[in-house]
Amino acid sequence: MRSRPFIANLDMYRKVPVDLLEGTKRGSILSTIAVATMTILFILETKAFFSSQLKTNLALDSNEDSQIRVNFNITMMDLKCDYATIDVVSVLGTQQNVTQHVQKYPIDQSGVRRSYQSRNLKQHDVQLFDATVEETIEELHADGEDAVSLDEHTFNIALEENEYVFVDFFANWCSHCRDLAPTWETLAEVMYQAAENRVEDQPDVHKYSDEDYNEALKVELPVLVGKVDCVDHHDFCLDQAIRAYPTLKFFVDGEEKGVYNGHRTVVEFTHFIAEMEKEHKGHKHADLKTEEIKEIATDRTVQTKEHEDYARALSATRHQHQPSWAEEQHPGCQISGFLLVDRAPGNFHIQAQSRGHDLAAHMTNVSHIINHLSFGKPFSNYFIKKGLQNTPAGFLETTRPFDGNVYVTHKEHEAHHHYLKVITTEFDPESGTQKKYDKKKGFYKPLDKNRAYQILQSSQLSLYRADIVPEAKFTYDLSPIAVSYEKTSRAWYDYFTSLMAIIGGTFTVVGMLESGIHTISSKKRR
């Protein structure tokens, strides 16, 4: 007998005659369950096939950029824009008082931003003392001091007895104050010379006794020029909110009318005083005492052709006095913009400093609100809505964890320091973005991945020595490990394999279940 070929014997789908098949109610129910199960699994598998999953990868950072952008918007709650500066320090170098791409807006005590932008603090065009005053302070004091030394008691008396008072709040250790001292004393001499000229013009001056003459001088004195040593009168200067030395305040009828921030020369002081009197009395007032002092100041200090050129150069850059208001005791400053820093460990800090002042450390408060702080290219509103589809939930918040945080110091000589670990993160462009066409190669090249920077942050309150001015410090360090996110989807053959497994597996499992039930029921019948 000949044997059948192997292929003929290979039959996995042998048929049973229909006459031998018997339908049952149980088989119908199980078949319905099998069909329902396969349908549900088919729908779920198809849904999973057309969806994608977010995959996270870790690798060494391959970013070749030499610099990284730091975006910030920080409100200093108790620091004037005149003193607020930003310094950047890294292992590759230091940048002091960065002003490029940085804007500063004064904020009043209520937190309302004023409508104008503040000038940068370090105004190198401001003259800090009068170079035409060649006498030393000792030589000027040889015939007595004309700038009146004041304390809290005599200060109040001076405000009551004089219409105009110009006061220098200084510290005897301050180098800028020592440089200004001869200029300030000369200004006081100019005031007394103006008073003497007005008294000498009076018809009955020859009848005055020495006491009458001195009283007449007080009456005709255009402005009382005074000075307060804040080392000897520490508490009084605290009450006057003196934060830097020297601070030059002008008072009219006992009320503060502003702080002088212009050129510190005798001629420029007199122009400022004349503007203040015109503002107070009106430009058309018949008796303006301060008009004469500008001529006296010029005669007193401009002696040579060099002095004349010097005075003319300063007048060309004179900061015209504008009608002012009593400044609040605790103004703030909103600082916003961006920095380009080296991709190396470093820090940037906001501190109080001035080219023309020595700051009082105990009066420096760097409490601040971080409205925004992030690294890299800023996200547009459209990109935030559409471009972050290929990132995990909450990704945006990890790039700006400081936003809205408030850091307040309640004691002197302390400040908050912040530490940032910056992690480079890349992710695929949003779906639907057109690819870029490479003209040289003649085909569309894939889009570059979007790049952002996640931040791991921590903050702590740091204490300072009594002679060190506190600063709000932000120390950053870039992680050598980069994170990337990519959307992955299943291959078509994986999908069809799963469909086959669903059909075959369901058929097999239900068949085994039916066989088991059939066997148990047959034994019970016997």
Image: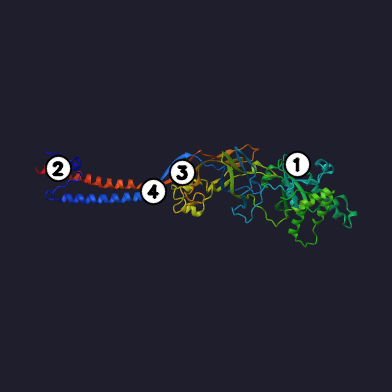
Pointer 3: what residue? 484
- Say what amino acid the circle numbered 4 marks: Ser
Foreground tag (1 vs 2): 2
Pointer 4: what residue? 52
Q: Mark 1 and mark 3 in contact? Answer it, CB < 8 Å.
A: no
Left or right, 275 with reference to 481: right
Foreground tag (4 vs 1): 4
Residue drawn at point x = 79 percent, y = 51 percent: 311
Residue drawn at point x = 16 percent, y = 44 percent: 517
The figure's colour scheme reads rainbow
Q: Report, in whole angstroms, how far the alpha carbon at label 1 lies from the one at label 3.
A: 59 Å
Q: Quick one: label 3, few (<14), some, or many (20+) residues within 10 Å?
A: many
Q: Quick one: label 2, few (<14), some, or many (20+) residues within 10 Å?
A: few
Whole-percent x and y of residue 244?
68, 45
**Marked residue nearer the N-terminal end (1 or 3):** 1
Whole-percent x and y of residue 319?
72, 53
**Marked residue nearer the N-terminal end (3 or 2):** 3
Left or right, 151 with reference to 300: left
Q: Report, in whole angstroms, how far the alpha carbon at label 4 lies from the one at label 1.
A: 72 Å
**Marked residue nearer the N-terminal end (1 or 2):** 1
**Marked residue nearer the N-terminal end (4 or 2):** 4
Q: Report, in whole angstroms, how far the alpha carbon at label 1 lies from the one at label 2.
A: 111 Å
- Say what amino acid the circle numbered 3 marks: Ser
Describe the element under mark 1 as helix, strand or loop. Answer: helix
Residue drawn at point x = 16 percent, y = 47 percent: 15
Report the front residue among 440 and 323. Answer: 440
Pointer 1: what residue? 178
Q: Which mark is residue 200?
A: none
Report the front residue among 399 and 285. Answer: 399
Pointer 2: what residue? 519
